[in-house]
Image (cartoon, rainbow, N blue to C red):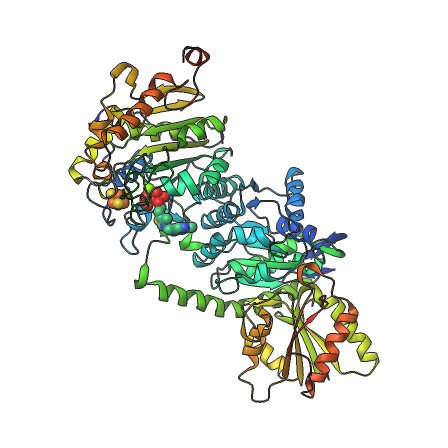
Amino acid sequence: MAELPVIDYERITTVHKTPLEEFYTSGHRTCQGCESAMVMRDFSKAAGPRTIATGSTGCMYVANTSYQTTPWIIPWMHTQLGAAGASAVGTSAGLRALMRKGKIPKEKINVITFCGDLGGGDMGLSGISGALQTDLDLLIILYDNESAANTDIQATGLTTYGAQTTFTPPGKKHRIMQRRWKKNVAPMLAVGHPTCRYVATACATYPQLDFLNKVRKALNVGGPTFIHTFDPCPKGWDYHPRYSHELGELGIRSGIFPLYEIIDGKISYTYDPHKKGRVPVRDYLMKQGRFAHLIDEDIDYIQGMVDTMWDEWEIPGVAPFKSELQLASN
Amino acid sequence: MARIKEDIKEEFEVWEKEDLLNGCQAVSHGVRLADVDVIAAYPIRPYTEVMDVLSKIIADGELDAEYIIADSEHSQFEIVKHASSVGARAFAGSSGTGWMYGFEALVVTATDRLPPLFLVGNRALDDPGAFGVEHNDAMAVRDMGWLLCWVTTAQEALEHVLIGYRVAEDKRVRMPMGLAMDGAFLTHSQHMVQMPTKEAVERFLPVYDLGKRRLHPDNPISIAPQVNEDWVMELRRQNWEAARRAKKVIVEAYQEFNGIFGPRYSSPFFTEFMTGDAEAVMIGLGALAMPARTAVRRLREQGQKVGYVNLRWFRPFPTQELRECLGRFKAVGVIDRDFAHGSPDSGGILLHEIRSCLYPLEDRPNIINFITGLGGRDVSIDDCIRMYDLTLQAKDGEVEDEFVTWIGVRE
Ligand SMILES: Cc1ncc(C[n+]2csc(CCOP(=O)(O)OP(=O)(O)O)c2C)c(N)n1
Ligand code: SF4
Ligand SMILES: [Mg+2]
């Protein structure tokens, strides 16, 4: 889409330089301390008014957008639970055709689609993959609160191992019902779509301004892009809303949710535990009611998995293969 | 043939050439002529050929459109729904199990009141696999707020892309349009097709304009927010009103079509064949008209007063028009190339619609039902003659067989 004028976003270097204008405002009724709502607020703030958003069913639809009290200042449209990728493609393709054929004025309009971990990470994976294979300008944000939150907190393919959810309650016979290891969505998409030039993971509040800038970077790079955010959810994770930001930070610093971006095939860590170290996952897990039933053995298991990821994976957080050297020494 | 524009008195050609085309090819030319902006494709027989042809049309530069190869029918239909919401004229299609795979998206396209056009190349639903025609696939959207019509020839197929978009996109309507045609018997059978000129089509088909409902930064609306019990009834009611208005819009569209292209359609909703003095008629959808009309001719030669009603528009259902039409006869045989298992009398879908349509008449014709041609089984002229015989018996209330008869099934 080289012929279109590009909005060249500046990097936001300090909090004071954050745009004041809000495009996601009052009218929603998400829980106090909802970090997914922060994702909504921040992506629209970073992208600005020449943006069309679509979003799949989930908390960020049902708790967000009640008729006659929409929080969206930018145009927004609902899409079905598994249709995030298709909605981005349809919107972007429609705009591109209309502009090319002179049916609407030519200008850069951002198409940003958001989906939850169930909608995007499980059901909609094939549609997102399809979207990332196109040459259309679109950004897909998977906001990951680690459950089907809207339907009362059921485990998804992205729920942390061991967590209690309404589908995975601890019982007398089985302490752990969530026995699936978190699906590695962002790297799967990055590795599988060589022409997708930007894939990142992010947390709306840690490090400060990082998510805003990742959204801008994705839009600057153009083409189909993808960001996976890590969103503490007080209702689903069972903690006091005042700890949302802190849990986000602990999730990153414990290394359980790796933060990085991959631009044109090059990976750079936003938070690099190799340099900055990791806090024990226990510090992160034990602040949440959803892990209250875990015993030391379980926590050691999770810690061991996270250690392996950072110490032995070919590319920590991304490629779960071990180098020949590591294999030989095992 | 040349026509005179009313406003500027200048001649323009209406037809450019004649070609031997099958149903799918004809539809692809309709899509080209409608200057569609976004096409989403996914393969499934028998509708796929329309997408094969369209990709070549685009590759040859005869149409400027985004051609998206979707990852599934669900995505395919969502893509055209969203393209339609930003003001792009959009086209998709499917058959049988593919149509059902994307069903959720088909439903929301209607409830969002968006007007893409879809070709349904009718196909039996799996399992077991079968490529042949059966109407249950398209019929599944009948209660969902769709426009739905069946065409019988490749010429009609092409023309109904144009008529379909015009009706669907009309401000008073804005509903998705299902253009159904029998798998194989029309999708892949060739007819001579007259090709309209671009100029004539532009005159008939206005540009797609969603007005205040177009999603764009200059018009920052929220589409489809959560409503719950507060508003769903009102929204359903609006769908219903749109479907009611659609009937008038359909009539206008055919009038205008006939005005530009010549008197091609005697009536929009259905066509009657040799019904003038008929006592017993059959009614059905799609390619069944071919053997049925031949059977009528043969029976007429023997002095039997029979006729055929070829139903085109199934949604909106032409209640009043069909009531007046069918109310004239003593017996009506309803042919279903579908089934409605467990329904009243275990009849077909069309039976239930026709029976309920005729119920208020004081002097109702006797009605019987035939289930036939499922999974693409051929419905022969002899089969049709047999169905006419039974319908003629029903005229005098003499049907010994069951009220619903399966024709052409191994017993
Ligand atoms: C096809 C379909 N299946 C099921 C549902 C019910 N449903 C609505 S929201 C939701 C959970 C979505 O979870 P996620 O995508 O993680 O978003 P969150 O609610 O966590 O924000 C489900 C299962 C639906 N709307 N559509
Ligand atoms: S349940 Fe979680 S994701 Fe949903 S609104 Fe509440 S905090 Fe946000
Ligand atoms: Mg979720």
Which residue is outermost to the right?
B301
Asked where in the image residue A7 lies, by quadrant, the reply is top left
Asked whether B297 or A91 is in front, the reply is B297
Residue B15 seen in render: yes
State how many labels appear.
0
Relative to B223, does residue B60 appear above or below in the rendering? above
Q: Position of residue B137 (x, y in %)?
A: 58, 58
Q: Position of residue B186 (x, y in %)?
A: 71, 57
Which residue is outermost to the front?
A173
The quadrant the N terminus of chain B occupies is: bottom right
Relative to B355, does residue A60 appear above or below in the rendering? above
Residue at x 33%, y 25% (from the top left corner): A305
Asked whether B22 or A315 is in front, the reply is A315
Relative to A228, does residue B11 appear above or below in the rendering? below
Q: Position of residue A120 (x, y in %)?
A: 40, 40
Asked where in the image residue B353 lies, by quadrant, the reply is bottom right
Seen in the image, is B51 located left or right of residue B191?
left
Asked whether B137 or A148 is in front, the reply is A148
Residue at x 71%, y 68% (from the top left corner): B411
Relative to B347, does residue B169 appear above or below in the rendering? above
Asked whether A150 or B7 is in front, the reply is A150
